Amino acid sequence: MRIKRTILLVDADDHKRGLRTFMLQTHGFRVVGASDAVDALEILAVDARVDMLLTDYVLTRPGGEELARKAKEMYPALPVIIVCKLLSMQPDITNADRFLCGRLASPAEVLEAVRVLMRGRRGTRAKVAA
């Protein structure tokens, strides 16, 4: 049996998190959800089986960029995607492997970004196995 890759999905919007969870699960991914960065960091500290972090840019303190920075400090090989629904938002994102903004944050674009970054990358598992 093929082991499913695990995505830590962080979004304060329950509805949006639920839709993305459904989309990712129907495409074969295991999804662990968190509503804020504090919960996400706790999950990363405990669960070394996370293969990717997918987070909204706009979170309550800390925000998505800060979450990405802290996650990369813990697991440098962890692929990170930050999503922002605002078209006008073009922040300087330095801690994410991919930043999807506005129209690029459609479900199809998110799924494609996940698939591309998952190829050949094992996230936190790579560090644990080494």
Image: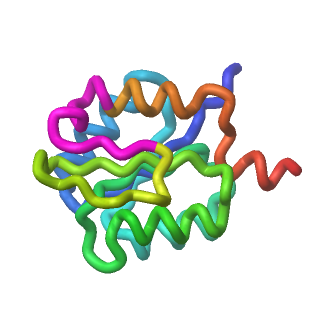
- Image coordinates for residue 126, horizontal then vertical, percent: 76, 46
Q: Quadrant of the N terminus?
A: top right
Quadrant assignment, res 110: top left
Segment tinted magenta in the rendering: 98-109
- 127 falls in the magenta region: no
Quadrant assignment, res 91: bottom left
- Which residue is painted at 34% across and 39% down in the image? 21
Instruction: Give left or right: position of 84 versus 31.
Output: left
- Which residue is painted at 34% across and 60% down in the image? 92
Q: Nearer the viewer, residue 49 or 57?
A: 57
- Which residue is painted at 25% across and 30% down in the image? 107
**Placement of 16 over or under 76, stated as above or below:** above
Instruction: Give left or right: position of 63 versus 121.
Output: left
- Image coordinates for residue 23, horizontal then vertical, percent: 32, 29
- 108 falls in the magenta region: yes
Seen as rendered, the residue at the extreme right is 130
**Placement of 46 over or under 51, stated as above or below:** below
Q: Nearer the viewer, residue 103 or 126?
A: 103
- Image coordinates for residue 115, horizontal then vertical, percent: 49, 26
Quadrant assignment, res 18: top left
Instruction: Give left or right: position of 5 versus 128.
Output: left
**Placement of 39 over or under 126, stated as above or below:** below
- Which residue is painted at 63% across and 68% down in the image? 73
- Asked which colour scheme the image uses, the reply is rainbow
